[in-house]
Amino acid sequence: MPIYQITQYQPGVEAEQARIGIEASRDWVWPFAHDEQGWFHLHQSPDFDPDLSFFAWGDGAMVGHLTFFPQPAAPDSPDRVTVFMEFPRVLPGHPDAAQSLIIHAEQALRQKGIGHITGRLSTMNPQELPVMEKLGYTLRDRGYKLYYVYPMEQGRIDHPALAQVAPVRFPDDLDEAAALAARWYHRPAAWCREHLVEWHREGIISHYCIRSTSEMIAACLTAVNENRPVTAANYSIYTPDSTTLEPLLAAAVNACITHGIRELVADLVNEHRPYEDTYQKLGFQKAAEWVNFEKNLV
């Protein structure tokens, strides 16, 4: 294994953190990474502990990073200190840097009296699961969240209920749409409305709804991935059943084709997780799954 120098947080690393995160996830089903301003914001958060942020260096250049965040104590173990992590972001060509970061971080966490690590990983990066298993982490809830993808070469979806689908009018319908988005995000409707407004102003592919008489009962907002604009996702989707889900998905797919999108990524999690059969019926294909993990350090 190559030898990497591991350091802890120092101001001024944000630009490189952002670059590595974007580069590491470039070929994932859904590329996601904080930009430089996002890292600045996190580093100013009251929850950020610079002693819990680690960086791997090779030949004098940053090649990876890993950050932990404190978690509330569990009711059954109030004295156990827990932190949360996502798998390290490392540049292509440096797969061993991830393992080096985790091993070094575990030693530092023990010295701080931290006894428990929780986190999540995704099969989008094939390195993640085998590394965590090798390092003794317990995997659980495999598939609690899935990514399904609709490849646009399959063509438009001619669903018989498409006539029920209508655009969400901006800004007139946003209060109703935010109320439905709150069921997707499990966040207050006011928070959801702010984000819907932001997405509309930045530019979306589509925002469709279905009404029963005059009441909005289902809605779906679709927009591009800022790190790979040929990929889109349903950022917010709520439907009470598969009957309304099918035409909403068909409308979103057709809008993506019109906009020249290459693939539409769908997030199946929480109350939306049971709709896997519906996605398969419409031609979506399973692309990745998420797994929770944990490890006791003491």
Image (cartoon, helix red, strand yellow):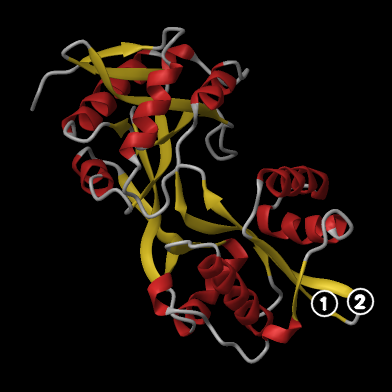
- 198 vs 33, left or right, is right
Would you say residue 141 is visible in this rendering? no
Mark 2, other Cα within 10 Å: few <14 / some 14–19 / many ≥20: few
**Residue that mark 2 sits on:** 214
Q: Nearer the viewer, residue 136 or 125?
A: 125
Give residue 102's position: percent from left, percent from top. Answer: 28, 28
Vertical comparison of 99 with 44: above or below: below
Q: Residue at the location (47% across, 29% down)? A: 83
Q: Nearer the viewer, residue 200 or 62?
A: 200
- 209 vs 106, left or right, is right
Q: Residue at the location (30% across, 11% down)? A: 7
Location of the C terminus by quadrant is top left
Q: Amino acid at mark 2?
A: Ser
Q: Are marks 2 and 1 in contact (CB under 8 Å)?
A: yes
Q: Nearer the viewer, residue 283 or 97?
A: 283
Q: Amino acid at mark 1?
A: Arg
Say which element carries label 2.
Answer: loop
Give residue 85's position: percent from left, percent from top. Answer: 42, 34
Vertical comparison of 176 with 20: above or below: below
Q: Residue at the location (27% across, 25% down)? A: 101
Image quadrant assignment for residue 136: top left
- 63 vs 196, left or right, is left
The Cα atoms of the two marked residues, 2 and 1, are separated by 6 Å
Total numbered badges shown on the rendered structure = 2
- 224 vs 183, left or right, is left
Image quadrant assignment for residue 64: top left
Question: Which label belongs to residue 50?
Answer: none
Question: Which label belongs to residue 211?
Answer: 1
Vertical comparison of 286 with 250: above or below: above
Image quadrant assignment for residue 140: bottom left
Q: Nearer the viewer, residue 232 or 5?
A: 232
